[in-house]
Each structure stands twice: as C-alpha cells, then as structure tokens.
Amino acid sequence: MKMIEKYRGVKSATGRLFQHTVNVTRLSMVCALLAAGLLVPAASAGPACAGGKRGIETMTANLYIGGGINRVVALDPTDPDYLTKLVSTVTGVYYEIAASQPDVRLGGVADAIVARMPDIVAVEEATLLRNQSPGDLIVGGTSPATNVVFDYVQILLDELAARGAHYAVASAADEWEVEMPMFNLQTGSIDDVRQTDREAILVRTDLPRGQLRVSNPQDGHFNNVIVFSSIGLELTRGWCSVDVCARGQVFRYICTHLEEETAPQVQLLQAKELLCGPAKTFLPVLLCGDFNADPLHRDGSTAYNKFSGAGFRDAWADTHRRNPAGGLTWGHDELLADPGVTFNRRIDFVFYRGCSFVPTRSDVLDLWLGREEPPLWASDHAAVDAEFVLW
C-alpha cells in the first residue's frame, strides 16, 4: 500500500486567517439588545446589497462513499494471508461503491438542492476515486493512480447544472488519501485504486450581482487524527472555509467532518482545534457539516457541548424546541438497501454564532430516491437545510 504524503497540521490562525476589522462595540450592543428582546428584525427592512432578499439559506449533506471501507482497516497485517485478504477486501469494497451508483445517488442530492436552492451548500465525504490498470503496487511501484473513476464533487455540479442550477466550488479540502491493490473482474489484472476523501463548499453563481460574494478560501487538517501505524494509514480530517458577503452582512462559513463517535476523545480534540482555528474570528460564523457527535451523548461523545460552550447554537434545535430527540440524520444500512434500517442518530448540524443570524426554519431531508431497487437513498445520511434572516 502506498500513501500520498499530506500536510497534517492545522493552518495557523494568525498566519493564514484573513484579519477583518469590525466595530466590536456596535456588534456587542446589537447582540445585547437582541438578547434583551428590545430589538427585532424589521420585515420591511431594505437590503444593503442588490437583489431584495434579506436572508441566507444553507444546506449540508454527507455524500457517502457508498461502501464499507472499515472492512479494510479491520484486516490484520500480521496475518500470513494479509496481502491476499487485502486485495480481496479492497476488490469487494470497490465494486460495492460502483454498485451504489454514485451518479444516481448524487442526482438525488441535486434534486434536494434544487428543491430548496440554498445559497451555500456544504458537502462531506465527497470522494474522488481513481485507478491505475494494471497497477504497480503489487510489484513495489510508487506511481499514483490518476484515471478518474468517480469525482463526487464534479458529478454533483454536473447534475445541478443539468437541472438548471448553477453552483461552483468556493473552497475544498482534501483529507485522507490511500492507494491499494485490487482485482479487476473485467480484465483479470491487479489494479491500483486510490481514494481521496474531501469536503467542499458550493455557492450559487446565478444570483444578482453583489448579493452573494465569497473570498479568502482556506482549508486545514487536524493534528489529532487516528493512525493505523501497522499499515501506514492516517485518517486525516479537517475543514474548509470561505468568508461571505451576503445582503450587506459579512460572515465566515466553515465546512467540516469530525472523527467518528467510536473515537470520542479524538473527536473532542478536533472540535477544540476547529474552535481555536478557523472559528476563532470576530466575524459571525456558520459552521456546517458531519460532526459525528450525538447531542444526547449516547456514544460517549461530548463534542456537541464543546461547540455550544463556545457560543454556537444549533439551527435545528432552536427551531424545534419541543422535539429535542428528533431530527435524526444518520443510520441507513451500508448498502442503502434495507427500508427497515432507519435513522437513529442526529450528527449533522448547522451551527451558528453571532447576532447577525436569526434562524427561521431548519429541516432534515431524508434523501429517498423513490426506487424499488437499491440504492434506495442517496446517502446513509440525511441532508440538513436551514434558513436565516440576516441583519
């Protein structure tokens, strides 16, 4: 197995984060008035930018790779038959991903986006899958696979464009990257397959001029990650961000994907890095993504509390106060084939901080494809959509 070397440190909050000058006194006064209920949004207030819309809508969606990649890291490298089992397992996962029909699934995600037309979309687990046929890993080669098999970001953009929706990538982050050997069932050769995990922020490009502008794209990796030293695999995770000017307001938008709930301490440390990194700003912040953190702490995770302790609020919770155990977003089966396997965790969030945001609506969207044969859903996650008044 060959690994593509990647920078693993968090980018410096002082060295790379763009510094904005804000009137902190005015911002604090407005927030205080809001908290006291002495100031309310004016429904007839005119926009500071062109277009007439005085709000912002966002959606976050985990695109799901489409296969059980955990089976690969579960193999024992000390097993005498490890190489044979590795090739067999990677082959099974690869064809499972192909059978999940990424084009169809991402078309379903595009349908959900087009139905709402959010201004900004955060996507996680946006896989880039490449191969090399025949491969050279099995003979000790080091040439990385470059032939694109599935590019989830590009597929989604193409599906959106086919539906008349115009979005572009504003910022993206490459996370873990690994290349392994597999058996090509069509040619009989031993190929190499290379998977890159990514997050991305998509923004609308069809709005009136001046209504939505983005700048200062950034990305970074967490220092605290899971490492499988026996096989040389590091589960790199991180974030990407942009600064947004929308309808006269400026804020930071961050997309992230934290470690799974099976490693709650690592997840908590990543949350701390996020708060001390891109989220450490005087700007209001929208923080969206797959946090793998259950607010009810059923998996031992406390990362959710870390964000609320840092002043972040949960858009879904704030708009569904009578249903604290609802809004579930994860839990479909690996093959997206069993309608009896329903969601059991809420781990995807739209967090916000700063008095510029007043949430008016938030919805959990189960990405059902309306099919009788698998895949039944676009992802094993639901998408989360939220709308805010900006002022």
Image (cartoon, helix red, strand yellow):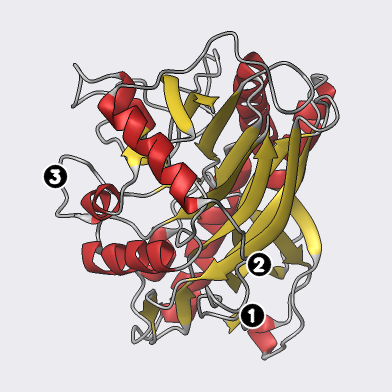
Instruction: Identify the mark at residue 4; answer none if there is no mark.
Output: 1
Of marks 3 and 2, the one in the foreground:
3
Q: Is residue 361 left or right of residue 146?
A: left
Instruction: Identify the secondary structure beneath mark 1.
Output: loop
Q: Is residue 140 above or below residue 367?
A: below
Q: Is residue 78 above or below residue 219?
A: below
Residue at 60%, 55% (x, y): give it. 241
Amino acid under label 2?
Arg
Q: How many marks?
A: 3
Of residues 73 and 175, the one drawn nearer to the viewer in this rendering: 175
Instruction: Identify the mark at residue 335; answer none if there is no mark.
Output: none
Where's the C terminus, which quadrant? top right
Q: Is residue 168 left or right of residue 227?
A: right
The CA distance from mark 1 to mark 2 is 9 Å
Residue annotated with mark 2? 194
| Residue 240, image quadrant | bottom right
Amino acid under label 3?
Arg
